[in-house]
Image (cartoon, rainbow, N blue to C red):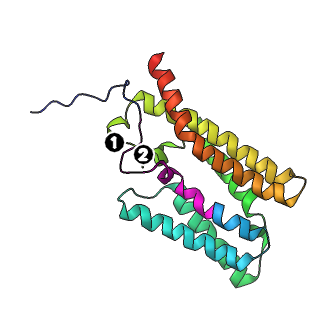
């Protein structure tokens, strides 16, 4: 019987050569594309764009055989609820506070998973790295660290959306922060993994 050695903690969670790191963050696409539209109170267009983007993200990952995450399903369900409330009852409460609600829910999700000893980013990181490193302590530590970074980013987004002095800051500062965090996450994760291995 062939013997398979367990994954080594000296293995860095490098991105898979055939996948881009951007695939880890596609669940945020509906938010990035719909919120700028909703800020101008184009409720119907924003809702439709959000739903279409959510469906495209889910279909893409199913075709890639990567499965779907809680964020993928959550954004789609949130969009469908908004559609029912707006088109069915003319209620704009959820859609008019969409950014704050989503940032709050995402921060809560990160916090709850951290308290349970789980890293929020793990489900997304698995889309872009080899399965060989999924069970290594370096991979788990890198995701624990990057989950804390994302939790802080969502909290700052929430505060900016709630207390920004002008509408442009309430909208674009959180989106800019999300983009910067998404770009920085792979590098920060690699840095933390190297630190963990070297310790």
Q: How many marks?
A: 2
Using the image, tell me which numbered label, if any, was put on residue 131.
Answer: 1
Q: CA distance from mark 1 to mark 2?
A: 7 Å
Q: Is residue 2 left or right of residue 130?
A: left
Q: Quadrant of the N terminus?
A: top left
Which residue does the image show at 74% across and 68% down from the upper left?
94
Q: Is residue 127 left or right of residue 8?
A: right
Using the image, tell me which numbered label, if any, was put on residue 1.
Answer: none
Quadrant in the rendering for residue 168 = bottom right
| Marks 1 and 2 close (CB-CB < 8 Å) | yes
Residue 21 falls inside the magenta stretch: yes
Task: Tell me which numbered mark, 1 or 2, is placed earlier along the sequence.
Answer: 2
Quadrant in the rendering for residue 90 = bottom right
Q: Is residue 181 above or below residue 136?
A: below
Q: Is residue 96 above or below residue 164?
A: below
Q: Which residue is mark 2?
A: 126
Q: Which residues are magenta?
A: 13-31
Which residue does the image show at 40% across and 31% down from the upper left?
12
Which residue does the image show at 74% across and 76% down from the upper left?
43
**x%, y% of residue 199?**
48, 15
Circle 1: element type: helix
Q: Is residue 140 above or below residue 49?
A: above
Closer to the camera, 124 or 107?
A: 124
Q: Residues within 10 Å of mark 1 (few under 14, many from 20)?
A: few
**x%, y% of residue 100?**
75, 57
**x%, y% of residue 136?**
38, 30
Asked if residue 108 can be seen in this view, the reply is: no
Q: Residues within 10 Å of mark 2 (few under 14, many from 20)?
A: some
The residue furthest bottom is: 88
């Amino acid at each position: 019987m062939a013997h398979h050695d367990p994954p080594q903690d000296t293995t860095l969670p490098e991105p898979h050569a055939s996948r881009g790191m951007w695939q880890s963050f596609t669940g945020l696409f509906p938010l990035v594309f719909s919120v700028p539209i909703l800020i101008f109170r184009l409720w119907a267009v924003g809702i439709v764009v959000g739903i279409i983007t959510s469906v495209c993200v889910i279909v893409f990952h199913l075709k890639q055989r990567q499965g779907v995450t809680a964020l993928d399903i959550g954004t789609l369900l949130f969009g469908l609820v908004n559609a029912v409330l707006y088109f069915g009852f003319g209620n704009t409460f959820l859609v008019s506070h969409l950014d704050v609600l989503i940032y709050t829910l995402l921060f809560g999700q990160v916090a709850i998973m951290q308290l349970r000893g789980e890293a929020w980013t793990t489900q997304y990181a698995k889309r872009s790295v080899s399965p060989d490193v999924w069970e290594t302590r370096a991979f788990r530590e890198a995701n624990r660290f990057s989950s804390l970074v994302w939790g802080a980013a969502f909290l700052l987004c929430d505060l900016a959306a709630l207390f920004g002095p002008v509408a442009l800051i309430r909208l674009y500062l959180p989106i800019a922060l999300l983009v910067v965090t998404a770009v920085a996450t792979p590098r920060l994760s690699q840095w933390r993994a190297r630190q963990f291995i070297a310790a």
